[in-house]
Image: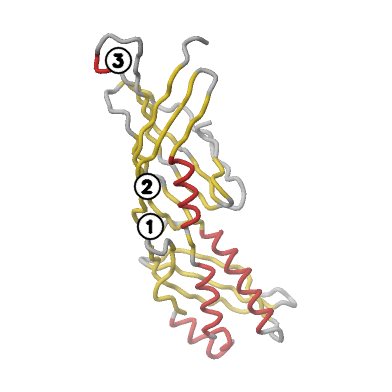
Amino acid sequence: VNSTPINISKDLWLLPKPIKVSISQVSTPENKVSNQLYVNIGIIAQPKLLTCTSKPFIERTKNIPVCVEHFKPKIYLYPTIHIQYDYIEKRIKKGLNSFIDKNYADTSYRAGHINIYPSDEKLVVSVELIDTEDKDKVLTFYLWGIPHLDTDAQIVQLKHFDYTLDSKNVLIHTAKWILDDKIKNIILEKSVFNYSKKFSELSKSVSAITVVTENGILKSQTHSLQIQDLFTSKDALIITISAKGSMSYSINLNN
């Protein structure tokens, strides 16, 4: 179970990724005589939210370390939303070819392989132009922008987005029509990711959870969930989130 991706919504998967389990000593409420026993079970994990069109393969986590510790029963979650570059690449390719077919039907060019990768503080979008007849590559042009997290609009977008200088010089002499601002805007539009729906679904899914098991009832509540920051990695844009809450598990000893 600890290694199984959980489908939160369309194209959004939660990977639990636990790395440590802690157990407290058994106690009673306020250390007084009682018919109730408390034991705190803590889990340190690195949860990951992954944008993916199909269920991702995750290697099963084995031999998670367990230790005895004293701690308060609170939840501190720091999940991350990973916007995979290949997810954005597919959107750009589909949108760009649809635009070319509609507005440049007389051209024999189409968008081929799209590749996104980080370069210092920028994100580069490379677009391969191919000949529709023989499928040969004609040229590759590049655009880049600075990844920006807009927490008010709840979107991730590329600021100061434009063709690289080298690409402009090449396209002026080979395929000037590609420098049309409409084409640049299509690529920019398809690279924008609105995370409001994903964040709302995540908030609802973790706000209050009740799970009835064979031996008891698990209950949890999340009191706050906040977007923190945006980072780039080799294969994804990463939105970091912080969450706080509480959890309890009532064991039915009659079974």
Quarter of the image for residue 104 reads bottom right
Q: Amino acid at mark 2?
A: Leu
With respect to residue 213, does 102 lie above or below? below
Residue 135 picture location, percent across and down: 70, 73
Tell me residue 58's x, y (percent).
54, 40
- The answer to whether any part of residue 195 appears in the image is yes
The amino acid at mark 3 is: Ser
- Asked if one can make out residue 235 in the rendered structure from this viewpoint, the answer is no
Tell me the distance, in whole angstroms, between the alpha carbons under discs 2 and 3.
30 Å
Between circles 1 and 2, the one closer to the viewer is 2
Point 70% across, 82% down: residue: 108
Q: In the image, is 123 to the left or to the right of 13?
A: left
Which numbered circle lies on residue 225?
2
Whole-percent x, y for residue 115 in the image = 54, 66
Q: Amino acid at mark 1?
A: Phe
Looking at the picture, the colour scheme in use is: secondary structure
Mark closer to the observer (1, 3): 3
Q: Which residue is mark 3?
A: 27
- State if disc 3 and disc 1 touch (CB < 8 Å): no
For the point 36% across and 66% down, which residue is it? Answer: 121
Secondary structure beneath label 1: strand
Q: Mark 2: few, some, or many residues within 10 Å (few <14, many ≥20)?
A: many
Label 3 CA crowd tier, 10 Å (few <14, some 14–19, many 20+): some
**What element does badge 2 sit on?**
strand
Q: Which mark is residue 231?
A: 1
Quadrant in which residue 76 is drawn = top left
Q: CA distance from mark 1 to mark 2?
A: 18 Å
- Real-space Cα separation, disc 1 to disc 3, in angstroms: 42 Å
Mark 1 burial class by Cα count in 10 Å: few <14, some 14-19, many 20+: some
Q: Residue furthest front?
A: 34
